[in-house]
Image: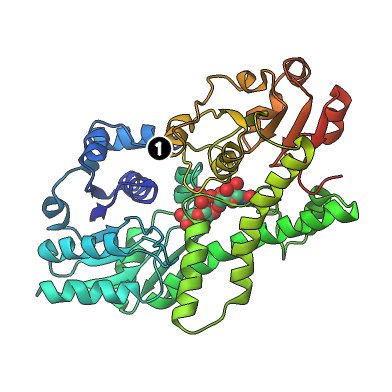
Amino acid sequence: MKIAIIGAGYVGLTSAAVFAKIGHKVFITDKDGEKISLIAVGKIPFYEKGLEELAKKMVLRGMLNAIESTEKAVKDADAIFICVGTPTKKSGEADLSQVFSAAKEISKYIKNGAVVVNKSTVPVSTAEKVRDLISKNTNAKFYISSCPEFLREGSALSDTLNPSRIVIGANTHYAKKILVKLHERLPGERVLTDLRTAETIKYASNAFLAAKISFMNEIANLCESSGANVSDVALGMGLDPRIGKSFLNAGIGYGGSCFPKDTRALHSVATLHKYDFKLLKAIIEVNQLQKRRFLDKIEIALGNLKTKRIGALGLAFKNNTDDVRESAALEIISMLMKRGAKVSAYDPLASENAKKILPNLTPRKKPEDVFEKADCVLILTEWPEFKDLAWAKLKLKMHRPLIIDGRNLLNPSKMRKIGFKYISVGRP
Ligand code: UGA
């Protein structure tokens, strides 16, 4: 089939490369011409493991075509995917302007029989609004569907090649049939449902994962008073298959371009429908408080932060990505700087992006650099390589041997044996 993809971000570009790999002819377009020029020569505009190699291969084979013209991409496409951003408005609700402007563009060129597929994360009933908007501008008979994306940054390619499920939402048999066919070479359960349910599955999944994290953060906070160990609690809970082992890591709160935005947007949807979603409000509040609580720990350990030298390991919102959107690490560093601390930070991938948000921060080239005369070193992103630092040697560089681990990455007894004062989240 011929597929058009509007939007070359994580979702659009990963989907494009995977659809090309499974035999579809893909045309990807984006309003950012620089992104398109990069992809056209087999490069990608962000870091994502394995994606550049696959994209390049598909470009060379002529299966993945990055073009600036929406007309060329859309005009004889069998399926047109909307994969644009849905950022948060000040009010918390999702800003759908990019979705609607993509729909308007599509309406100019769409052919008879095409299926428009929304992959952007959107509030319930958006697909119907997209349908109405396109209908106003075209006489072509087209079909609308919602096919939410569940990939994670850092493992986007393997998640898309091995999806746990493919959710296909449509109110017509024809759209469902085309989407089933389009995905036939991918594994995973199929969930065939209506438009509104598919849209709700996406928000509900992200909010539920956020709930797991906020719940464990509260258990961790309780463990700090009761003397229990949250890591063992998570292990003991996670072995119950009804609970599952993943997303039980306590820390400094979730970040990224999805959970914070999508929990706020779902809350707005609930408010719009006059539903008081109490649990969701608590999930969001606990996440915000978790960062404050971490800051309190630093202040209790160091006293007044003015002129204190603090080393920070990690800037990205999680490991394996250079993305710093709504990164808890950056929020904590910014609060420390506001309190007068001198922060020196390192991240294996995210330094350039972090500088755009915190221009006063000069990220260091090596993790070792942040230990120089430090009053304390923080672990803010769960990069596994931080585990293997030469901790005993690095201790000698510090002004005082204090580690505050916001990701429970290190082994407490090992750190104490080396001679560190070691504080983590919910572990005695
Ligand atoms: C999330 C979902 O996991 C994907 O399924 C979804 O497709 C995606 O949002 C999206 O809507 O596009 P992502 O934002 O890439 O993916 O990152 P996650 O791996 O989910 O992590 C989110 C945050 O939670 C990170 O800050 C991470 O450090 C934190 N986290 C995760 C914890 O604090 N504890 C955990 O146990 C797990």
Q: In percent of the image, x 30 and y 77: which residue is there?
A: 128
Q: Is residue 387 left or right of residue 87?
A: right
| Figure disc tally | 1
Q: How far from the left and from the top, in percent, is residue 225?
A: 86, 54
Residue 86 is drawn in which quadrant? bottom left
Residue nearest the viewer, comparing 6 with 374: 374
**Residue at numbered disc 1:** 51
Q: Amino acid at mark 1?
A: Leu
Q: Position of residue 106 (x, y in %)?
A: 17, 62
Residue 6 locus on image (x, y percent): 25, 54
Bin the neighbour count of mark 1 within 10 Å (Cα to Cα): few under 14, some 14-19, many 20 and up.
Answer: many
Q: Nearer the viewer, residue 244 or 357?
A: 357
**Residue 200 in the image: above or below residue 250:** below
Mark 1: is the Cβ under 8 angstroms from ligand 1? no
In the depicted structure, whether residue 126 falls above or below residue 225: below
Q: Residue at x 45, y 50 (%)?
A: 160
Describe the colour scheme in one phrase.
rainbow
In the rendered structure, the answer to whether residue 251 lies left or right of residue 348 reads right
As drawn, is 412 to the left or to the right of 408?
Answer: right
What element does badge 1 sit on?
helix
- Can residue 299 be seen in this snapshot? yes
The residue sitting at 48% across, 62% down in the picture is 262
Q: Quadrant of residue 238?
A: bottom right
Task: Classify residue 298 by image quadrant.
Answer: top right
Whether residue 152 is situated above or below residue 189 in the rendered picture: above
Q: Quadrant of the N terminus?
A: bottom left
